[in-house]
Image (cartoon, grey):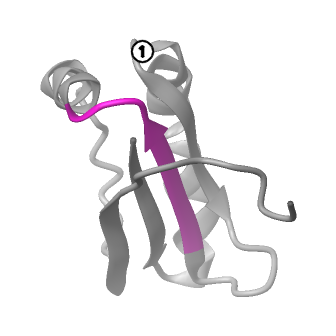
Amino acid sequence: MLIIAGHVEVAPAQRDAYVAAFHDLLRRSRAAAGCLDCAITADPIDPARVNVFERWDSAEHLEAWRAVANAPDPGIALANNHVMKYTAADERPPFD
């Protein structure tokens, strides 16, 4: 399993427009083969922060999606990008 997680920072006045620019991509991503979850959301505390989360069942599905995703260019500059890709070896409830 692959997890892409972290956050980007944009100008606070542009954050909602940045998030909205990805709504169609998110709808399509969630319907893509192998996508277990996907979200790009405004942080509830930091007005410049956009949280990014994707979970994929395999690298093959992620790469197939990336080849056809056609991600938007919102035309909004990133002040910082703290998004990383992780490989997960197992899965279990967090509080068991």
> Could you say which is closer to the camera, residue 18 or residue 61?
61
Could you say where residue 19 lies in the image, as x and y percent from the top left?
A: 56, 53
**Quadrant of the rendered structure where residue 48 is?**
bottom right
| Tag count | 1
Q: Tell which of 86 and 84 is nearer to you.
A: 86
Side of 5 where 87 appears, left or right: left
Q: Secondary structure at mark 1?
A: loop
Vertical side of 72 occupied by 79: above or below: below
Residue 24 in the image: x percent, y percent?
50, 26
Residue at figure coordinates x 50%, y 49% from the top left: 90
Which of these two is toward me, 73 or 32? Answer: 32
Outermost residue toward the right in this view: 95
* Residue 62 image offset from top left, x and y in percent: 27, 31
Where 88 sits versus 69, above or below?
Answer: below
The quarter of the picture where residue 25 lies is top left
Which range of residues does the magenta coloring cover?
50-59
Q: Find residue 13 and report its image quarter.
A: bottom right
Residue at numbered disc 1: 32
